[in-house]
Amino acid sequence: MGEKLKKNWTCRAVCHTGYGMKMTMHIDEALLKRVMERYECETKTEAVEMALREMDRKARFRELGMRGLEMTPEEIGAAVDPDYDVNAMRVAETPTKYGKK
């Protein structure tokens, strides 16, 4: 094997093992296509990874809510500005867009 080829092969192997693993999965193709289109994912891997990250985010957020931020209801109430307008913040917030921009 040539030195250049060997060097490229080693880099690819290290990059692949550092990133994740290749696997076979049975996924509803219509669902995957809708997700890829809606979130502008260019690859199936990108769509699956985005969906997994979102599910992980939701689970961690739910766990945080179940712990109650480790504060009493009174402490939580005292931590919120009484003039805070959630609707105004939602209007001002830029929505998250998944996939390629």
Image (cartoon, rainbow, N blue to C red):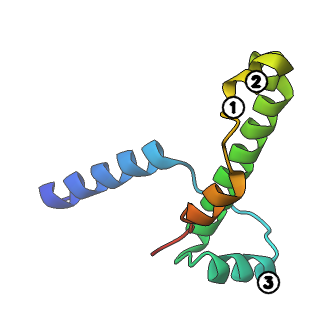
Q: Position of residue 49 (x, y in %)?
A: 61, 58
> Residue at horizontal 64%, vertical 51%?
53
Q: Of callouts 3 and 1, which one flags the residue occurring earlier in the amino acid sequence?
A: 3
For label 3, the residue is: 30
Q: Is residue 86 above or below residue 44?
A: above
Task: State which quadrant residue 35 falls in.
Answer: bottom right
Indicate the amino acid at tag 3: Ala
Assess whether mark 1 and mark 2 are in contact (beta carbons under 8 angstroms): yes
Residue 84, position as x, y percentages in the image: 66, 43
**Label disc, if present, on residue 80 of the rendered structure:** 1
- Amino acid at the residue labelled 2: Ile
Q: Measure how far apart labels 3 and 1 are at the Cα level.
A: 43 Å
Residue 76 tag number: 2
The quarter holding residue 51 reads bottom right
Asked which secondary structure carries label 3, the reply is helix
Q: Residue at x 76, y 17 (%)?
A: 75
Q: Where is residue 77 shown, x and y percent of the image?
A: 77, 26
Residue 101 visible: yes
Q: Residue furthest left?
A: 3
- Mark 3 burial class by Cα count in 10 Å: few <14, some 14-19, many 20+: few
Q: State the separation of the CA atoms marked 3 and 2.
A: 43 Å
Q: Looking at the image, which is closer to me, 88 or 9?
A: 88
Going by the image, does 65 lie left or right of 83? right
On-image quarter of the C terminus: bottom left
Q: State yes or no: discs 3 and 2 in contact (Cβ < 8 Å).
A: no
Going by the numbered disc 1, the residue's amino acid type is Val
Query: Which of the two marks, 3 or 2, is nearer to us in this view?
Result: 2
Is 57 situated above or below 27? above
Neighbor class of circle 2 (other Cα within 10 Å; few <14, some 14-19, many 20+) is few
Q: Earlier in the sequence, mark 3 or mark 2?
A: 3
The label nearer to you, 3 versus 1, is 1
Give the secondary structure at mark 1.
loop
